[in-house]
Amino acid sequence: MTARTVRALVNGAERHFTLEDRTLLIDALRDAGLTGTKLSCDMEVCGACTVLLDGLPVSACTTLAAEIDGREVSTIEGLAVGGQLSPVQRAFVECSAFQCGFCTPGMILTATALLRSDPDPDPEQVGRWMEGNICRCTGYDSILKAIALAAERGR
Amino acid sequence: MSGRKVVGASVPRIDGVAKVTGAARFASDLTLPGMLHGRIARSTRAHARLVSIHAEDAMRVRGVVRVVTARDLMELVPYYGHIVLDHPILAVDTVRFQGEPLALVVADTREAAAEAADQVWADYQDLESVVDAEAALRPEAPVLHPVRGRPVGDEGFDPGGSLPTGNICAEYSLAWGDLGAAFASADLVLEADYRYPMLYGYAMEPYNALAAFEQGDLVVYSSAQHPYMVRNDLSRIFGLPLARVRVVVPYVGGGYGTKSYTKVEPLASVAAWLLQRPVQVQLSVEESILTTRSDSALIRARSAFTRDGRLLGRDMDIILNSGAYTDNSPLVAQKALNRCFGPYRMEALRARVRAVFTNTVPASSLRGFGAPQGNLGGETQMDEAADRLGIDPVRLRMLNLVGPGEEILPGKRGVDADLAADLDQLAEALGWPRPGPGLNAGFGLSASDAGAFPVSTVMVRIHADGSASTLTGATELGQGSRTVMAQIVAEELGLEMGQVAVVASDTGVTPYERTTGASRTTTLAGRALIDACKDARRQIREAAAEAEGVAVSEVEDAPGGVRVGGRLVGYGEALRRWFGAEAEISGSGLVRRAGDFQKMPPFWEIGCSGVLVGVDEETGVVSVEKLVTLGDVGFAINPALVEGQDAGAATMGLGAALHEQLVYDGDMLLNSNVVDYRVPRFHDTPREMTHLLVQRGDGSGPYGAKGGGEGAGNPIGGAIASAIGRATGRYPRELPLTPERVWRLFKEDDGDQD
């Protein structure tokens, strides 16, 4: 196995990862202590491991860690700045848009990317972006409401 | 009103910020220094004698430390099971389902363990397998357990009636009245076989455990719902005193019953014992599916009605496919029996449930267990009877419902709810009897004997600064138990939410809690907590009286402290003055099967849900336009959390009704992943969802509360089936109602109905 060093901007700070070619992004992140990124389906359908790569959602379970070299990665740990929750995080809390919280980091990151790309999405558009994130505890109604609330506040 | 300040309000979850920032720690996030990783090598056969296991190739993989098999466990009790000790930690001599653990490969890294696990192979001597539960009941069927496991002997669990034989894991029956006469005098008899699918709960955090021996004591971090039950299994396996087994459960990524009882904790623990190093076992979703699923069921339902809609009698016979080992199947069977005929008055009843061993993944708990299965047959027959008799189905149910306080099960607690009023509210919210153009309505009721066995103990510590900690063995699964318990303590002690902490689910620290399931925590742990707060307040009053030199009767409770002669003395001050230095006290409270909880069940959990659906006749695609749940919870301590539970239960119900099913091809499971096993996604959300809460203060829990969170899902399968029955003119008999099945209802006439 060849080891290589990868540099990336993770949550705004430059980080170096020494990893094997086969190392997956989820393992690199979690082994670096960023355990907010969750592993569930391990086949890119549930969205629990969603992180933002150059601002767009990817499944860390099927992305090679080497791919982040020279790029920007956002994980759930990077959203709250100076102890202030982001608008999407705040809306998720206020709308009770989660229970166990295992899908929540991925949900929030996908919703964050959505609102950056389209600050005023209609429910259809929200559905298209969020279709790749599964929630088993609470259904999707409260998540839709949280995204709508965050969008409304952003306007 | 009551003057209550904190309970009854949708205060924010106390775990909210941790869960939206990635800070909430789950067992799968934990590591220990020097930790090894275990990966399971699994059986490729469904039923075989295990001749030998070959680990040589696996041992050659770099980083592999040991390959553990049942042979390494001879000094231990190599089985677990909270009712019957028949589930091997690793296969002993025989494998009974495809995917059964054969060996645990332990390595320095996850990658090495995974690579090596693929290189463990076994010699098998194949045995005839049986996958279908009806087939397993035939006399010629291969018997999975010719020698039965030993019942554990916990009085809270009945291992299943008189010594079951053959492949019957457990059998229960119930009867009253003259069934023959009831059916003979009926104007309408409905009779059909219904099939409920085999489901996977898909809690998104897969099963995992991290075990270590510390000074000879076993410490396990796990994703378990019931840490005390897991502790008991581990204690039996190692012959360790309960005090020397500590099971710690941090946040849990989804439970829904699927994480009740022991899963991978013994595997991690035996490896840690053999190697004297910490060992973590984390399953994939595919492996989790191979660990626990829910019982599929064949429900033979027969109902007798008079022409004016009175239910005369019911004859229910349910066969549960319970998989390879006992696990929780006796309890599931018992609950299926109690929950299958509905909260209706009837002169005669005969009901029987058999849980049957098959060469499939072991079945255990899943949300509402036993209830959704029987409910499908029972409730769709209420609708079908109404249609046949030309009676409104709401009215037909009203005619037969038990009233408040009336018994559903002879000798048991009378129903602590007003079902007729509930149904009335639900029907109105659904727009019944005019669902709207192109739409059909379906609704259903269920009453579950919930709460499990009423044993719960809690403690409250009042600290020197007047803040308080709650110690509870109830596990936070997302249902919000920590928030609700903090609300109760804040209310009872007159504190702000920010002054209350909850420490949960650490068997070495927190007091005994039997289980976290059956919707019990708010009702039972909540009641114990009220007593613990009273106990703490009593101690403070006594301390304050002694310190101030007054009679205890002159000391009154006040928010955050006591009042002595008109002066407010905070808890901290009262404690300091009495002890003479900084100190704290603890109050304790408990619930046992006595007093309010002498009569079983501890409470009835009501299900009352309805849907409006559109059905595309060309494609068979079903769209759920509106879904209404009604939570008859007595008192909602946190309404937003109750609504969230109902929304979640209903969504799971929709999954089972429309999409979800584990499928066996022969004795191989075909769809052990979440691509081929389809759970509800964003686009499946009903266009409109309404969650009604009914609060009549009629529960046995704190402030008149009673449990919720399972009920809303139980009637959904039947409700969807009835709506589709109305749309197609033919009542479905089998879930899930995939487009193909619905299309066939429109197109095919099998002569089964009319």
Image (cartoon, coloured by chain):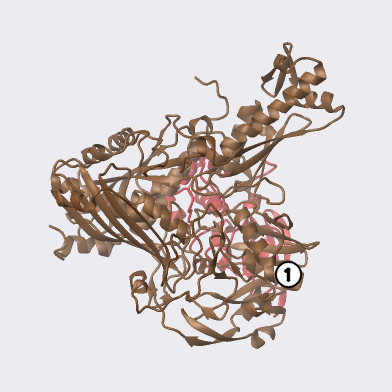
Residue A144 position, x and y percent, is 45, 45
Between residue B721 and residue B17, name the one nearer to us. Answer: B721
Residue B386 visible in the shown view? yes
Please name the residue shown 34% across and 52% down the image: B340
Image quarter of residue B73: bottom right
Residue B266 position, x and y percent, is 64, 66
* Residue B654 left/right relative to B382: right
> Which quarter of the rendering shows the C terminus of chain B?
bottom left
Q: Residue furthest top?
A: B566
Residue B159 position, x and y percent, is 49, 60
Residue B507 position, x and y percent, is 68, 51
Between residue A56 and residue B678, name the one nearer to us. Answer: B678
In red, which chain?
A
**Count of numbered labels shown in the rendering:** 1
Residue A120 visible in the shown view? no
Instruction: Kindly identify the amino acid type of the residue bearing the numbered disc 1.
Output: Trp
Which residue in the protein does label 1 denote?
B273
Chain bearing mark 1: B
In brown, which chain?
B
Between residue B641 and residue B213, name the one nearer to us. Answer: B213
Q: Residue furthest right?
A: B580
The vertical placement of B604 against B301, above or below, is above
Please name the residue shown 44% across and 69% down the image: B323
Image quarter of residue B697: top left
Image quarter of residue B500: top right
Please name the residue shown 51% across and 63% down the image: B327
* Residue B104 left/right relative to B373: right
Please name the residue shown 60% across and 46% down the image: B474
Classify 10 Å Cα crowding around label 1: few (below 14), some (14-19), many (20 and above): some
